Amino acid sequence: MKQSVQVSILGQQFNLKSEASPEQVHRVARYAEDQIARVTASGRAVDSLQATILALLNVSAAHLEGESATSGLDALEPRLGRLIEKIEATLG
């Protein structure tokens, strides 16, 4: 069941509805704010909107890199299964 959790990001309050625990929602909000703070500290952003967009792009890139790494492993799974079968047949 979804519950409402209030978080603060960049001094703005947000009421988020989520099925995740309140602790998890707060953890996600802190992570987002940390990413924005990193961009801000680097001096790459002029204002909070730019910092937020750059942080979103950084998080998206990291997510997509992780996703493509996982999909690469998924492609290997059938081949690994066949190799395991051959090893078991040889040993057994």
Image (cartoon, rainbow, N blue to C red):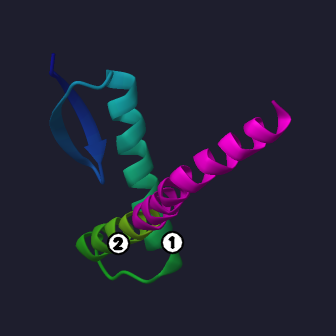
* Point 27% across, 36% down: residue: 7
Which three-letter amino acid code belongs to the residue tagged 2?
Answer: Leu
Residue 48 in the image, given as x and y percentages of width and height = 28, 69
Query: Which residue occupies the extreme right position in the image?
Result: 91
> Which circle, 1 or 2, is nearer the viewer?
2
Q: Which portion, as a residue range, is magenta?
A: 63-92
C-alpha span from label 1 to label 2:
16 Å
Which of disc 2 and disc 1 is earlier in sequence? 1
In this figure, which residue is indicated by the disc labeled 2? Answer: 57
Q: Is residue 72 above or below residue 20?
A: below
- Label 2 secondary element: helix
Q: Quadrant of the N terminus?
A: top left
Q: Main secondary structure of the magenta part?
A: helix
* Point 15% across, 21% down: residue: 2
Magenta segment: does it hold 84?
Answer: yes
Q: Quadrant of the C terminus?
A: top right
Q: Who is closer to the viewer here, 6 or 91? A: 91
Could you tell whether 2 is left or right of 42 in the image?
left
Residue 78 in the image, given as x and y percentages of width and height = 52, 51
In this figure, which residue is indicated by the disc labeled 1? Answer: 41
Could you tell whether 69 is left or right of 10 in the image?
right
Which three-letter amino acid code belongs to the residue tagged 1?
Answer: Ala
Query: Which residue occupies the extreme top position in the image?
Result: 1
Residue 41 in the image, given as x and y percentages of width and height = 51, 72
Residue 10 in the image, given as x and y percentages of width and height = 30, 54
Q: Quadrant of residue 59?
A: bottom left
- Label 1 secondary element: helix
